Amino acid sequence: MSPTPELKYTRGAFIAYEPDGYPTKKRVIPFRFNPEAISRTVAVEAGSSGGGVEGAAPAAAAAPAADTKADAAAGALKESFSIQIRLDFDDRGDAAKGIEDAYGIAPEIAAIEDLLYPAQTESEKASDGKGAVSPARPRPTVLLVWGKDRILPVRIASLKIDESVYNAELYPVRAEIEASLEVLGAAEGRSHKGVQAALDHTNQARRRLAGLYYANSGSQGPILPSSF
């Protein structure tokens, strides 16, 4: 009897683009274990969704007044996610094999946590910290990639990091991270083509999947009067 072939799963990931660096300057953080569950909330907000897209563009342009009124009248859609990311030193992926074992999973935690901080310029990376403090730069633009049909530009609202086991150097070797994510919207997409491209891709995929259901659901529902 031949052995059962190993199943290969698509891995979720964060992809972070540096300010002014879309689509080439990016960092990829694949999930070692796909979260077993994702909590999603989709809501219609009353009034304008407002501005503010720190992380989507270095200088987000203000939306035209007509667009703002249209958004307010229609009610802006807001979507949020809560996901659990699990890390374990004993199951490190190939991308972490070259990292010294003494650091445990601290580099992976730091990479995820770094998505909340303003991006550094090359001169800042080389600085010894003694120079003048420069103005804060925008945060990177982050995409949540969850399969080929869901690629969402997100703002990481918070990270809850639970470290449970440490090595002799007090670096964590096991952790769970609860990430709260807010999906960016049309206002942010107007000033950043990467955000708009991700929104368009996911919206088209949603409509395509819904269309598959609509095309086959007519004969399954209750019989309606001919006037409907």
Image: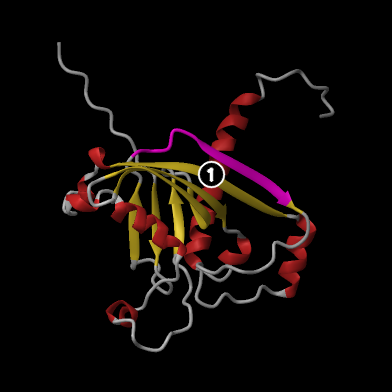
Q: What residue appears at the point 74 percent right and 74 percent down from the top-left corner?
A: 65
Give coordinates of residue 91: x percent, y percent.
25, 38
The quarter of the rendered structure image containing the C terminus is: top right
Bin the neighbour count of mark 1 within 10 Å (Cα to Cα): few under 14, some 14-19, many 20 and up. Answer: some
In the depicted structure, whether residue 141 falls above or below residue 103: below
Instruction: In this rendered view, identify the residue nearer to me: 178 or 82.
Output: 178
The quarter of the rendered structure image containing the N terminus is: top left
Membership of 43 in magenta stretch: yes
Q: Which residues are magenta?
A: 33-44
In the figure, is residue 142 to the left or right of 110? Answer: right
Give coordinates of residue 208: x percent, y percent.
54, 41
Q: What residue appears at the point 45 percent right and 51 percent down from the top-left corner?
A: 144
| Quadrant in the picture for residue 76 | bottom right
Instruction: In this rendered view, identify the residue nearer to me: 193 or 154.
Output: 154
Instruction: In this rendered view, identify the residue nearer to me: 67 or 118.
Output: 118
Three-letter code, disc 1: Ser
Instruction: In this rendered view, identify the residue nearer to me: 140 or 170.
Output: 170
| Quadrant in the picture for residue 209 | top right
Q: What residue appears at the point 43 percent right and 37 percent down from the top-left corner?
A: 35
In the figure, is residue 157 to the left or right of 23? Answer: right
Give coordinates of residue 66: x percent, y percent.
75, 71
In the depicted structure, whether residue 144 falls above or below residue 16: above
Q: What residue appears at the point 30 percent right and 53 percent down from the top-left corner?
A: 106
Give coordinates of residue 184: x percent, y percent.
57, 58
Looking at the rendered structure, the secondary structure element under dot 1 is strand
Which residue is under mark 1? 82
* Numbered disc total: 1
In the depicted structure, whether residue 167 falls above or below residue 121: above
Membership of 187 in magenta stretch: no
Residue sticking out furthest to the bottom: 132
